[in-house]
């Protein structure tokens, strides 16, 4: 009887203390979210399914999204996020097919200028009734433009690898 | 080397069998001009050159075909007279065999030099900057294989106040003998080039280091240098990688170049002897770098020797000229066997830095299966820069690149000594190349992410600005409309009162 009472009191007292401490010492989550957001590409392309990079950062800080949720960021961003979040990351779950690039199929483009305003990095160059072009250096391959093209002239392709950027394969394990 | 040095200095490097003779003793052969030349636009370290000719244009030998792009780049010239057939792609002389942009020149067979070459009888009377400019105009790059633009090296040495010019005649790679042959046959031109480089860099004296397995070259260079007090020829022990900048400078001057620093940090600049010859030709005769001496060697080459080949000749044409191939080569290499690049096929062009073409037989290629590391540390003893290849490779195998960098991966000069001595045949250099490539790719991804962030910010700023401007214009129009309305009202009111 005594033991039950003691434990009940102890539990109640500690619970109360924890509850008060939780209120008093609450940490604003905003700083964490801002730090995570700084690691994301910042293009708000929406491929993660959250409302922009800020939304994804908030979800990750809350633990609702894995650090590998950013497709255009690839492995590099996933690793940086995992390190910041202090979680281990199984890289095999990250689908990093390497950098991608949007390309305009010149025989299909009608020069309607609709895609231009959806590009988060202003990487598409075009004028009315002129064939558009994608600036390779500015395109992130986020595919935000693809669905807005009425003639399906925008195609996402893997970024071509030049010999200067070729990486020697790792030797097969013995 | 004195006894005390032998006891107290740390040993480094390896002594591979050199296979240099009989190729080194065969007289030089000049390759006839092939029908087509494939001039890669990326023959040098730095940005690729930009074509300055049009398809169908007629050019003469020595005319400029491509301009340097940016500060670290080099011009490319026509190795013969002919017509530009195309500007397209050719398989790069690189293990990947991926395409590289190239100018394709169809030779007309006349091999006429351009009339516009600027010759100079008294180059030592020229301003040092003018020498640098002429070297840049001639597209001269480091001929030892690193292909760094020479003019840039001359001017930066002058700015850095370099006092000693170290000339690399080591040629420590096995099989190669083109520098040896050049020093035997053209010692006078090399010494002239060295004196021009002394003038251009402001260095006080030059030391030519030649490995002691080339007595004929040492004798020829000593004879040619005898007339000049500021050029010394010093035999150095034959040991691989003696031709590596850090090792050569330390052996010749006793100064150690710090990790991550250039030789200029200890008042030294290093050039290859072949580069000195190219500088002399460029400044005295105005002739750009359009051909080079290279060694064709290896167990599968019928007649090994040294060949003068135009830049842009296909490797298969050079081999065919040197007598062709017997048997099936286990490996085709451009450069030396230790640091050269393994070529996937021979339809790739000779570039300015091609010191050799090797067709190795199975015994020479020595492909053996990798076995487990027995932690004997032979690699650590052989490493000339004193890092621990076995530990670094272990980290790379476990994908811990940060750990590998912490152990000095970035100081690795990729000389291959570790892999050469490894009793378990572990491809250590391949591990390091993989890690360095991966790190470079990660760096590029980071830079791209940074650039993307800036672009996204610039876009949102633009959208905000456009919205503001639109609002301002709308407000102004509205104000104008209201003013006009008020004026009209006032007028009609005035009219009524009148």
Image (cartoon, coloured by chain):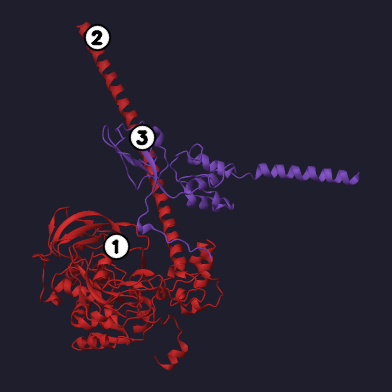
Q: Position of residue B213 (x, y in %)?
A: 33, 86
Pointer 3 and pointer 1: residues touching (CB < 8 Å)? no
- The answer to whether residue B201 shows anywhere in this view is no
Q: Is residue B436 above or below residue B388?
A: above
Q: Quadrant of residue B109?
A: bottom left
Pointer 2 and pointer 3: residues touching (CB < 8 Å)? no
- Of all chains in the rendering, the one displayed in purple is A
| Residue positioned most to the bottom | B3
Tally the numbered discs: 3
Q: Which residue is mark 1?
A: B348
Q: Colour of chain B?
A: red
Q: Nearer the viewer, residue A163 or B196?
A: A163
Image mark 3: chain: A
Label 3: which secondary element: loop
Q: Nearer the viewer, mark 3 or mark 1?
A: 1
The residue positioned 15% from the left and 77% from the top of the image is: B124
Q: Nearer the viewer, residue B318 or A102?
A: B318
Q: Which residue is mark 3?
A: A115
- Distance from label 2 to label 1 (Cα)? 90 Å
Q: Position of residue A99 (x, y in %)?
A: 42, 49
Label 2: few (<14), some (14–19) or many (≥20) C-alpha neighbours in 10 Å:
few
Q: Nearer the viewer, residue B389 or A77?
A: B389
- Distance from label 3 to label 1 (Cα)? 41 Å
- Distance from label 2 to label 3 (Cα)? 53 Å
Q: Which residue is mark 2?
A: B493
Q: Nearer the viewer, mark 2 or mark 1?
A: 1
């Amino acid at each position: 009887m005594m033991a039950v009472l003691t434990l009940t009191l102890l539990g109640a007292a500690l619970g109360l203390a924890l509850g008060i401490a939780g209120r008093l010492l609450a940490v604003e989550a905003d700083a964490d979210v801002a730090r995570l957001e700084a690691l994301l590409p910042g293009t708000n392309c929406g491929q993660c399914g959250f409302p922009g990079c800020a939304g994804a950062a908030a979800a990750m800080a809350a633990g609702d999204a894995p650090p590998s949720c950013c497709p255009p960021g690839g492995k590099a961003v996933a690793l940086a996020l995992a390190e910041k979040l202090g979680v281990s990351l199984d890289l095999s779950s990250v689908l990093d097919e390497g950098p991608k690039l949007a390309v305009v199929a010149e025989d299909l483009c009608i020069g309607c200028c609709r895609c231009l305003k959806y590009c988060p990095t202003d990487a598409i160059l075009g004028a009315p009734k002129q064939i558009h072009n994608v600036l390779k250096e500015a395109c992130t391959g986020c595919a935000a433009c693809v669905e807005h093209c009425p003639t399906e002239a925008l195609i996402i392709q893997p970024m071509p690898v030049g010999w200067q950027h070729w990486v020697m394969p790792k030797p097969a394990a013995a | 080397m004195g006894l005390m040095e032998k006891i107290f200095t740390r040993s480094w490097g390896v002594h591979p069998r050199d296979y240099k003779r009989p190729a080194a003793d065969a007289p030089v052969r000049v390759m006839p001009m092939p029908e087509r030349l494939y001039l890669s636009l990326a023959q040098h370290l730095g940005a690729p050159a930009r074509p300055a000719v049009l398809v169908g244009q007629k050019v003469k030998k020595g005319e400029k075909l491509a301009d340097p792009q940016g500060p670290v780049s080099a011009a490319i010239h026509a190795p013969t007279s002919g017509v530009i057939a195309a500007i397209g792609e050719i398989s790069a002389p690189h293990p990947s065999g991926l395409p590289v942009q190239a100018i394709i020149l169809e030779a007309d067979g006349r091999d006429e030099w351009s009339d516009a070459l600027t010759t100079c009888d008294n180059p030592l009377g020229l301003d040092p900057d003018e020498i640098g400019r002429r070297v840049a105009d001639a597209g001269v790059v480091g001929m030892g294989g690193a292909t760094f633009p020479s003019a840039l090296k001359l001017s930066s040495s002058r700015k850095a106040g370099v006092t000693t010019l170290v000339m690399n005649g080591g040629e420590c790679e096995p099989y190669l003998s083109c520098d040896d042959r050049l020093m035997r046959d053209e010692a006078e031109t090399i010494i002239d080039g060295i004196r021009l480089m002394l003038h251009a860099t402001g260095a006080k004296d030059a030391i030519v280091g030649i490995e002691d397995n080339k007595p004929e070259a040492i004798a020829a260079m000593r004879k040619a240098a005898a007339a000049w007090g500021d050029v010394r020829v010093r035999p150095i022990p034959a040991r691989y990688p003696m031709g590596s900048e850090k090792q050569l400078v330390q052996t010749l001057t006793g100064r150690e170049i710090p990790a991550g620093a250039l030789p200029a940090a200890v008042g030294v600049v290093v050039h290859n002897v072949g580069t000195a010859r190219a500088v002399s030709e460029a400044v005295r005769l105005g002739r750009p770098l359009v051909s080079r001496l290279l060694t064709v060697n290896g167990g599968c080459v019928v007649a090994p020797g040294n060949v003068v080949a135009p830049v842009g000749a296909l490797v298969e044409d050079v081999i065919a000229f040197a007598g062709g191939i017997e048997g099936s080569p286990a490996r085709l290499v451009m450069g030396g066997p230790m640091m050269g690049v393994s070529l996937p096929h021979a339809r790739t062009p000779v570039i300015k830095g091609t010191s050799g073409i090797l067709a190795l037989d199975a015994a020479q290629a020595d492909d053996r299966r990798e076995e487990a590391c027995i932690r004997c540390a032979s690699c650590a003893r052989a490493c000339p820069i004193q890092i621990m290849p076995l530990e670094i490779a272990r980290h790379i195998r476990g994908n811990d690149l940060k750990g590998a960098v912490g152990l000095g991966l970035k100081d690795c000069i990729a000389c291959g000594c570790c892999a050469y001595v490894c009793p378990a045949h572990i491809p250590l250099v391949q591990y390091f190349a993989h890690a360095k490539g991966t790190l470079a790719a990660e760096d590029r991804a980071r830079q791209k992410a940074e650039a993307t962030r800036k672009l996204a910010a610039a876009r949102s700023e633009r959208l905000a600005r456009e919205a503001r401007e639109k609002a301002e214009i709308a407000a102004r129009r509205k104000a104008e409309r209201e003013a006009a309305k008020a004026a009209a009202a006032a007028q009609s009111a005035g009219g009524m009162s009148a």
